[in-house]
């Protein structure tokens, strides 16, 4: 559904060259749910704009939904849906009219557009809002309308750019419930960005991480966590001196009285670790184990957090 080779995008700003995307090779199979992650300024949004024909590539190739983004952008647009970070609907028409108008823009007949709008309103629980204007809807309701607008023409591939950002936890869960229902109903390929790492961890079948314009990790969430981060053991010592000695013995990192140790299998490694510390005369006040997160994966690869907000855009 997505096939890129050597995809790049270079910007020139104030006579300075910025490589926003650097030679991306990416393949996405039909029907998959792929999360595309990276901190601010990593190249996520630029890559999405390249794949959706909103930006031309500087070099390289991209075939999306069977059409080349450079030679046949209209063909790409006819087979994809795009839900951006901002609201898609206008303020002048009612919800049903917005959907019908969007369907007509994609070439549907009036009757087909009306039928498709009704189908999506049922699936996305928008039927009771059909005569409301978008400006009167809640944030979660507007996002459901945005998704319906992106799906009105039955696209093979739907791009979702941070679909749940800014929503409260209940609305976020509601959006995901509807996204998964739609995927089950239509088998649509989903390619999404999100700042909520637990969403990618729990929902995506595949996670692709980008940093400085290059893909640095690609696999299932479990594969990435097992291969690149590992479990962690957190030890609390009685003194900073004990923590420093424990870190030297275990190969961990001491911060005050806390020691963090990366291991392949924390539950199995913890008893042996505690025995070794006891034999060395190091007293431990508390110990706990934890599975890694996707942020731990990124931290292992780059030395910083995926959720850093102070990176240059």
Image (spheres, rainbow, N blue to C red):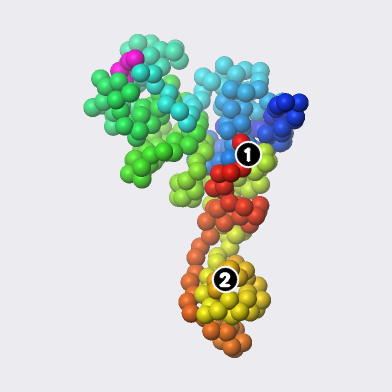
- Which is more toward the observer, 128 or 46? 46
Residue 57 shown left or right of residue 283 in the figure: right
Residue 282, percent from left and from top: 57, 84
Answer whether residue 32 is visible to the viewer in this image.
no
Residue 14 shown left or right of residue 35 in the figure: right
Q: Quadrant of the C terminus?
A: top right
Name the disc covering residue 206, or none. none
| SS category of the residue bearing label 2 | loop
Crowding around mark 2 (Cα neighbors within 10 Å: few <14, some 14 to 19, many 20+) is some
Residue 311 shown left or right of residue 162 in the figure: right
Q: Magenta residues?
A: 92-96
| Residue 297 part of the magenta segment | no
Residue 64, percent from left and from top: 59, 27
- Which quadrant of the figure has residue 276? bottom right
The residue that label 2 is drawn on is: 256
Residue 154, percent from left and from top: 43, 24
- Determine the residue positioned at 61% across, 79% down: 241
- Determine the residue positioned at 63% across, 57% down: 300
Label located before the other in sequence (1 or 2): 2
The residue that label 1 is drawn on is: 312
């Amino acid at each position: 559904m997505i096939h890129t080779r050597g995809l790049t995008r270079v910007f020139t700003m104030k006579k300075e060259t910025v490589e926003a995307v650097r030679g991306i090779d990416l393949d996405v199979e039909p029907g998959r749910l792929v999360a595309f992650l990276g901190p601010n300024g990593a190249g996520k949004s630029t890559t999405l704009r390249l794949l959706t024909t909103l930006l031309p590539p500087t070099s390289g190739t991209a075939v999306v939904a069977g059409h080349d983004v450079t030679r046949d952008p209209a063909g790409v647009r006819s087979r994809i849906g795009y839900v951006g970070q901002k609201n898609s609907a206008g303020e002048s028409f009612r919800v049903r009219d917005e959907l019908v108008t969007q369907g007509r823009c994609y070439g549907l007949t009036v009757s087909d557009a009306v039928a498709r709008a009704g189908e999506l309103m049922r699936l996305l629980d928008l039927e009771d809002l059909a005569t409301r204007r978008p400006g009167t809807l809640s944030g979660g309701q507007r996002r459901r309308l945005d998704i319906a607008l992106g799906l009105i023409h039955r696209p093979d591939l739907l791009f979702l750019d941070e679909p749940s950002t800014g929503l409260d936890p209940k609305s976020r869960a509601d959006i995901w419930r509807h996204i998964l229902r739609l995927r089950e109903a239509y088998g649509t390929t989903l390619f999404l960005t999100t700042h909520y790492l637990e969403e990618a961890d729990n929902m995506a079948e595949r996670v692709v991480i980008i940093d400085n314009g290059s893909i640095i990790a690609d696999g299932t969430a479990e594969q990435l966590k097992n291969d690149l981060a590992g479990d962690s053991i957190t030890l609390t010592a009685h003194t900073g001196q004990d923590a420093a000695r424990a870190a030297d013995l275990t190969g961990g990192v001491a911060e005050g009285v806390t020691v963090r140790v990366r291991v392949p299998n924390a539950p199995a490694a913890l008893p042996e670790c505690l025995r070794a510390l006891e034999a060395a005369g190091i007293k431990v006040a508390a110990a706990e184990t934890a599975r890694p997160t996707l942020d731990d994966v990124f931290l292992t690869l780059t030395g910083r957090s995926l959720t850093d907000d102070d990176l240059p855009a």
